[in-house]
Image: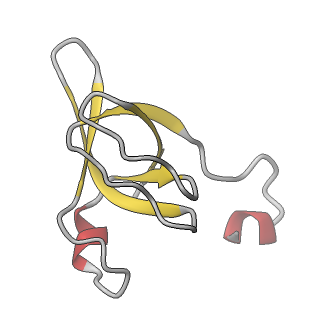
């Protein structure tokens, strides 16, 4: 939003994909951005794991995260190895 307000063209979050390293439950009725950590294995495959607490009032999970897992409204449960959309967080 800040980049857009500053008139920076082409600004916005870049979404990518990664594989889940932990199971996720079915999502509720709203889009959810889950704080997560990303790791890359020896073959270069990126895997993401949600941080333990997703409570929106807590800042510590956000400080631990280096990406967000994007969950669409009503998304079904997802398992280890499933491909998910992520937004990398660059600090």
Seen in the picture, residue 53 relative to 91 is either above or below; the reply is: below
In percent of width and height, residue 51 lies at 22, 60
Residue at image position (20%, 43%) is 22
Which quadrant would the N terminus be assigned to in this image? Answer: bottom right
Residue 60 vs residue 76: left or right?
Answer: left
Q: Quadrant of the C terminus?
A: bottom left
Give coordinates of residue 64: x percent, y percent: 22, 63
Give percent across and percent down for residue 6: 78, 69
Residue shown at 22% from the left, 71% from the top: 53
Left or right: 50 as drawn, with respect to 75 = left
**In this rendering, is residue 56 above or below 11?**
below
Residue that appears at 17% across and 65% down: 52
Q: In this orientation, which residue lies closer to the viewer: 27 or 33?
A: 27
Residue at the limit of the structure toward the bottom, as seen here: 57
- Horizontal and vertical percent position of residue 27: 45, 59
Compare residues 11 and 61 and report the one nearer the observer: 61
């Amino acid at each position: 939003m800040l980049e857009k307000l500053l008139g920076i063209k082409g600004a916005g979050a870049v979404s990518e994909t990664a594989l889940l390293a932990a199971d996720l439950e079915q999502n509720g009725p709203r889009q959810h951005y889950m704080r997560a950590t990303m790791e890359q294995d020896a073959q270069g495959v990126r895997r993401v794991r949600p941080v333990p607490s997703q409570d929106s009032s807590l800042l510590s999970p956000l400080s631990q995260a280096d990406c967000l897992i994007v969950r669409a409204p009503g998304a079904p449960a997802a398992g280890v190895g499933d491909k998910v959309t992520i937004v990398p967080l660059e600090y």
